[in-house]
Image: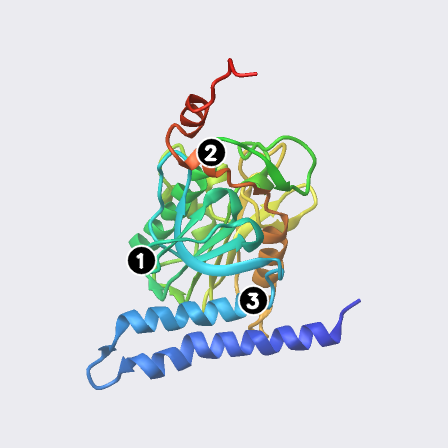
Amino acid sequence: MVSKIFEQLLLEQIEIFRNSFSNVSKNLFYDEKQGKLIHPGEYGSYREAIVKDFLKFVVPLNLDISQGFIINPNDEISTQCDIVIYDARVTPLIQSESRQRFFPVETVCAIGEIKSVLSKQDFKNAINKLTNVKKQRENIGTKTIIRKVIPGDYNPEICPYDQLFTFIVCQKLNFDIQNIASEINQLYDINLPGRYKHNLILSLEDGLLLYYEPKERRPMMYPTLRGYECLKNRFMQPTDDGVMHYKLFATYLFMGVSQTTVLFPEMADYISDTDNRIWGFINLDEP
């Protein structure tokens, strides 16, 4: 069964997103006479805002969307992330005087990169940047679970839901992508565990990169599952209607961020020697 209401509203959002990202942004910030972008910073910010508006249609209301840096208790910090999807209910407002936001990795559900036209080297840089942020989620102290869809201990090495969900949205992959499903693994750093790889890559013009679950023969948004060290990559090109890869991206993004485990950000883990200093003020000999 199909909900005509939901599908029509989704198609409307896809059309707005596609037209704004591909055409309106270029008309506003591209000088045809000079053959170059004017105000490239504003151009990037405008496109990020377009993606955020589209994501709001599919991201659960209990999650918020922003941008900033990901931090963990081991003093690791990411480069700036274009999209940060996080649980606002348990995320403290950590920001600098210039209003740069910093998000404890425990409460972040997904991060995304927004790109224009990607060369092969730029594409390689983007996917490897996402792996570094995923690694941060394994370097935390206290693991108090707030939300977890599968019962059990927090273990991002085994459970894909315990790992960050990562994605890229771009206009076009500007290199030979005929065999990208079989070649993309070669663009990752050598001996990289499968769990650190991307979840979804949406190219508006080219299609959607995700994975293939062999047992049930269906697309999958996680690079690893129990019993599979790393699933095969799958590249889904645009269908005749030109919207199926958008629909799949929206569907799997919703599923991914809805299932990501959320942890309590123990602030004491982020402050040096907090426990020792507290106990130093307490005289245990007092009645």
Q: CA distance from mark 2 to mark 3?
A: 29 Å
Identify whether 111 is placed above or below 223: below
Element under disc 3:
helix
Please state which amino acid type lies under the numbered disc 2. Ile
- Residues under numbered marks 1 and 3 in contact, where contact means CB atoms less than 8 Å apart: no
Count of labels shown?
3
- Residues under numbered marks 2 and 1 in contact, where contact means CB atoms less than 8 Å apart: no
Identify whether 278 is placed above or below 262: above
Element under disc 1:
loop
Q: Mark 2, mark 1: which one is toward the viewer?
A: 1
Please state which amino acid type lies under the numbered disc 1. Glu
Residue at the (21%, 86%) spot, across then down: 33
Residue 281, how many percent across, how many down? 43, 24
Asked if residue 210 lies left or right of residue 22, the reply is: right
Identify whether 82 is placed above or below 135: below
Residue 213, how many percent across, how many down? 63, 44
Q: Which residue is mark 3?
A: 56
Q: Which residue is mark 2?
A: 140
210 or 80, which lies in front? 80
Characterize the local packing of mark 1: few (<14), some (14-19) or many (20 or more) Cα atoms within 10 angstroms.
few
Residue 119, how many percent across, how many down? 31, 59
Please state which amino acid type lies under the numbered disc 3. Lys
Q: Closer to the N terminus: mark 1 or mark 3?
A: 3
Q: CA distance from mark 1 to mark 3?
A: 27 Å
Q: Closer to the N terminus: mark 2 or mark 3?
A: 3
Extreme left residue here?
34
Question: Which numbered dot is residue 97?
Answer: 1
